[in-house]
Image: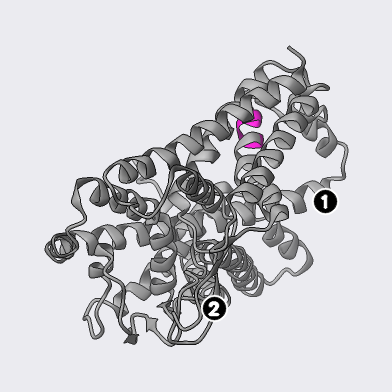
Amino acid sequence: MPLWLQGVVEFGQAAVLSALLVFLPLIGVWFADGFTDRDFASLARLGGQGWLLIHGVPLTLTFPAGTLASGATSGLLSLFPLGLTLIPFFLSWRAGRRLAKASYADQLWQALLGALGTYAIIGAAAAYFSGNEDVSISVTAGALIPLISAGLGLFIGARREAGSWVRLIGVDLTDWISRTSQHSRWAGSYVWAVVRAGVVGITAALGFSALLVTAALAMSWAEIVAVYQHLDAGIIGGVVLTVVELGMMPNFMGWALGWTSGAGFSLGTGSLISPLETTVGPLPAVPVFAALPAGGAEYAVAALALPVAAGLLAGWWFLREGENHFDEWLSLKIRARWFTAPVSTLLLGAFVGLVAGILAAAVVLISGGSAGIGRFVDVGADPLWTGLWIAAEVAVGVVAGYAVGPWLEREERR
């Protein structure tokens, strides 16, 4: 089989499997008479809209005049469940590994081009045929945006299988780096270590946020069950609602990250949920919303220390990595160690904090969005303020972690 055709087959399978995972719950609701006003063609369009939404494609919703209190007749639905986006990501990751296994280094581009071209065509077709008088979708967005999650999975899977960039793209990056000057290699090692320390910091901060979400769900379990009983959606409806909530868990982690930073997050225009203030208007009857933190909690302010703790871990990791070549260079230029050590440590905290802040802003940007209805056009944390708060808090933690790291690493003498 030609490689471009194998790419078509692999990504065609990924698209079909991810679509089936969207259609099966909808078909179950349809057979349970959950869509009494829909025929099967309309259900197929709804499934196409759901498939595009889990890939991050925004949908423009149109409402009859006078339906919304704000007077708006349309809204943009750009809030998509990141957990369900992992489905096409991992299917593409599998396809990338299979394509890399079947290709030589100078031929892999044929398989990748065929795979991405197929996904773009499928996305454009889904956007074209899924639109109706209530929902309109840009064909260009339908063709290009799904390539982000699918393309990331494809390249990561291919790189995983190839084992090296030389087999993946035909260029040996290690050999290219070895031909650069010593100063360039030192600078590159320092920058790369700073970037990885920033990744460690934001990963730890997200881990703490996930623990907070888990604790909030556990402590509010009785209230969540009460909302389920009040909804009385039936077995299939309850299962579909639970699947959607599970798919939104990574989004809730992004919102919790904004909460622990101090910037907070919003559930509708004019609302704010933060450790220092909580102002929330009427919310829809979604069971998981029963776990929202209430204002005035004693432990709320203590949550601001979590990003600092994440920065402490990042600073300790950087010390263990041993790539602080900027401190070595500064020590050669200025002999006063009492000056170079604090300056290099403070700059290290600023650099790592900047990386963590940029990554935090990206996380909350993709975890939030617009629900397209009424005041719920503003859902999630603010990327700018969350990024600034996380950058400052992680920077403080990095300075502390790098400073106390030598005592943590000291071994007992025998």
Residue 173 at least partly seen: yes
Q: Amino acid at mark 1?
A: His
In the depicted structure, whether residue 292 falls above or below residue 121: below
Dominant secondary structure, magenta: helix
In which quadrant will I find the N terminus?
A: top right
Residue at 57 percent across and 47 percent down: it is 321
Q: Is residue 157 magenta?
A: yes
Q: Nearer the viewer, mark 2 or mark 1?
A: 2
Q: Check contact, mark 2 vs mark 1: CB within 8 A.
A: no
Residue at 24 percent across and 63 percent down: it is 287
Q: Which portion, as a residue range, is magenta?
A: 155-160
Q: Amino acid at mark 2?
A: Thr
Q: Is residue 123 magenta?
A: no
- Left/right placement of residue 247 relative to residue 141 reads left
Look at mark 1 in the image and give the residue it sits on: 183
- Is disc 1 placed on a helix, strand or loop? helix
Label ID, residue 73: 2
- Where is residue 269? Give x, y as percent: 45, 84
- Where is residue 29? Give x, y as percent: 31, 46
In the depicted structure, whether residue 197 falls above or below residue 330: above
- Where is residue 170? Give x, y as percent: 82, 27
In the image shown, does 157 or 369 lie closer to the viewer?
369
- Is disc 2 placed on a helix, strand or loop? loop
In the image shown, does 412 or 144 lie closer to the viewer?
144
Q: How many other residues sit within 10 Å of disc 2, few (<14), some (14-19) or many (≥20)?
A: some
Looking at the picture, the colour scheme in use is one colour
In which quadrant will I find the C terminus?
A: top left
Residue 407 at least partly seen: no
- Left/right placement of residue 88 relative to residue 193 reads left
In the image shown, does 390 or 265 lie closer to the viewer?
265
Q: CA distance from mark 2 to mark 1?
A: 60 Å
